[in-house]
Amino acid sequence: EGYVPIPLLDTTDSGGLGDVAFKGEWIHRELGRDPATLALMVVQGDAMAPMFEEGDRVLVDKSQAGPASDWVYVLDVDGALQLRRLQRLPGNEIQASAANSAYTTFRFTLQDGSVSVIGRVVWVGKEL
């Protein structure tokens, strides 16, 4: 009772894997979010290490798919989900960078179609 389903995103093909239950009261009180706009993703790989490690869980607010601030977002890049820090640049360009310097920074526009922004990361749960 009092739990709400949050869809779990598949990091390999942008599909869904089912739902995970979160306390609705916690989402409203602690995050100030509408549970209907949230999705959960399990971090894969080390692109955003040490900020986000493999196995961490992140809640993504899909209502914030327009990168308005310099923050971490989930992107759909040719059908695969990725976490990247986004920064708006002049001329409608967006720069996507990883925390791990082994990964290449790239630029895109929301109109080019090869990259879409799924939403903004609003919470992380760390594995112990």
Image (tube, grey):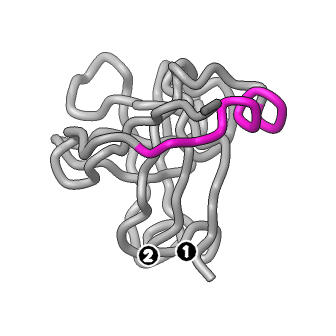
The reply, left or right, for residue 14 in relation to residue 41 is: left
Q: As displayed, is residue 77 above or below residue 51?
A: above
Crowd tier of the residue under label 2, counting other residues whose Cα lies within 10 Å: few below 14, some 14–19, many 20 or above:
some
Q: In this view of the protein, which residue sits in the foreground, 46 or 38?
A: 38
Q: Residue at x 57, y 67 (%)?
A: 52
Quadrant of the frame with the N terminus = top right
Q: Residue at x 28, y 42 (%)?
A: 18
- Percent from the top left, x then y, of residue 104? 38, 64
Q: In this view of the protein, which residue sits in the foreground, 127 or 122?
A: 127
Q: As displayed, is residue 100 above or below residue 14?
A: below
Q: Indicate yes or no whether the magenta region holds residue 112.
A: no
- Percent from the top left, x then y, of residue 43? 43, 63
Q: Indicate yes or no whether the magenta region holds residue 29.
A: yes
Q: Amino acid at mark 1?
A: Ala
Q: Which residue is mark 2?
A: 46
Q: Which residue is mark 1?
A: 49
Q: Do the residues under discs 2 and 1 have CB atoms within 8 angstroms?
A: yes
Task: Identify the element where label 1 is drawn.
Answer: loop
Residue 11: which numbered mark, if any? none
Q: As displayed, is residue 62 above or below residue 6?
A: above
Q: Amino acid at mark 2?
A: Asp
Give the extent of the magenta segment.
20-31
Crowd tier of the residue under label 1, counting other residues whose Cα lies within 10 Å: few below 14, some 14–19, many 20 or above:
few
Extreme residue in the bottom direction: 128
Q: In this view of the protein, which residue sits in the foreground, 62 or 108?
A: 62
Extreme residue in the right direction: 29
Q: Residue at x 75, y 38 (%)?
A: 26
Q: Residue at x 37, y 40 (%)?
A: 19
Q: Is most of the magenta stretch helix, strand or loop? A: helix
The reply, left or right, for residue 38 in relation to residue 103 is: right
Q: In this view of the protein, which residue sits in the foreground, 72 or 97?
A: 72
Task: Identify the element where label 2 is drawn.
Answer: loop
